Amino acid sequence: MQFPLKTESGVIKSLHIENFKSLQDVNLQLGTLNLFIGANASGKSNFFDALRVLQGIGYGFTISEILDGKPKGSGSVEWDAIRGGSAKALFEGNDSQEARFTLTIESNPAKSCCPAEYGIGFSPIMGKVLEEWFSGPEPIYDSRPVQQSGTDPILQARYYRGKPGRQPHFKFESSRPVLGQFTKGHPGQLAKSDVEHAQRLQILLADMQRLDPIPSLLRGYSQAHQIQRMGERGENFAALVRTLCADPDLKDTYLSWLRHLRPEEIDDVDTLRGAVGEPLFMLKENGREFPAPVLSDGTLRFAAITAAFFQPSMPAILTIEEIENGIHASRLRLLVELLRNRAGQGQTQIMATTHSPIVLAWLNEDEYATTFFCKRHEKTGESLICPLTELPHFQEVIRRQPISDLFAEGWMEAAL
């Protein structure tokens, strides 16, 4: 996917999700580093599915393609279906046929500027956008003031030009989000600044990397020789390591973190060459070479995740589930430092899940506000997602008992 503008260091400042899967009404204030904790099936993965919906909007896919998948075609990317597809995209506890996402974007967390706002309501069953609006910070377009027909394949939106008088209505396909159509359609009728603002949002949403390394891919030769970013499942991992090793400073930094995060002594990291020069990941320990096929799943996973934080082309948003997998318990403090360090650069917003009380033990107090406890309501099936700082009596209890114990002993489950 090609865009005419380079993305800026934007972050999703807030995200309100309504009627999507188990997320009936979740409204979160996010930071650059966000951790999600809780039992299995509590809603963490559904929240990450919501982020993938936003990524699909950034790519300009139709609603049906976002939810049900899209095969790879000429000049287009392959897109995996959201778990459950359109049939399971709505919250089952009410009769509403509309899921709605509202988010605010802050271009620079260091500046107290008015953020942009984007919202979309869509019907998974019909595969249609029902309402959509965007402001940045002045209103740019909004379909809500316009009378719509539920069966019309066209969605009309009012365009606010910042001029007195009646604002024009523009027509868009209702099968796909307006955002992508707005950046391409109606040439000469839209202010350049409005189009560029919409493009920046589209880039931010599309520039999301879901990292879920698969050991079988990490063990293999890379098809590429050098790359700027590896695939979401770890495709071309060895090519990324070769790229990092080509820069002495970048290699030293990557190797330093590998040595800190792994209890065994690592002499070096490098790649081996295949028959036609294709790279294969390799570690050197105690003077011996250990190519990827003989390394454990955990070793490969931690090496890939660590490499992801040093990709020359960092994503705007990086999502990782069960971040502690493959990391020795004695090194989890350093893992937290790595997450904090990379998020603190302001280049990438990190969303990660963890089941580890030890990870929580190494958080700073100011990170509790963007550490979210997830719980499924026993009767309604609704996912409750709450920042630790808003759990009842959290501030009092945390002074008397370590946060890791509160999590491990089930206090958070009882408090929410």
Image (cartoon, grey):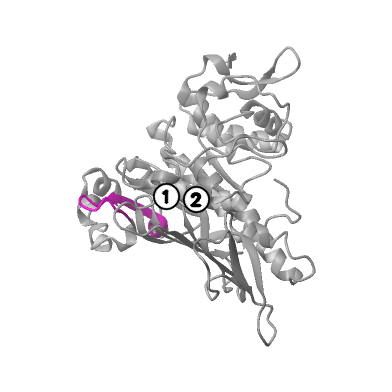
The residue wearing badge 2 is 51
Corner quadrant of residue 152: bottom right
Q: Position of residue 135 (x, y in %)?
A: 59, 71
Who is closer to the viewer here, 406 or 381?
381
Residue drawn at (50%, 41%) of the image: 68
Residue 347 can be seen, yes or no: no
Single out the residue that lies furthest toward the front.
151
Number of marks drawn: 2
Neighbourhood count class around disc 2 (C-alpha, 10 Å): few under 14, some 14–19, many 20 upward: some
Who is closer to the viewer here, 187 or 349?
187
Q: Position of residue 148 (x, y in %)?
A: 53, 69
The quadrant of the picture occupied by the N terminus is: top right
**Tag 1–tag 2 contact (CB < 8 Å):** yes
SS class, disc 2: helix
SS class, disc 1: helix
Amino acid marked by disc 2: Leu
Picture disc at residue 47: 1
**Is residue 337 placed above or below 280 in the rendered structure?**
below
**Is residue 129 placed above or below 65 in the rendered structure?**
below
Amino acid marked by disc 1: Phe
Single out the residue that lies furthest toward the bottom.
164
The span shown in magenta is 367-384
Residue 198 as seen in the image, left or right of residue 39: right
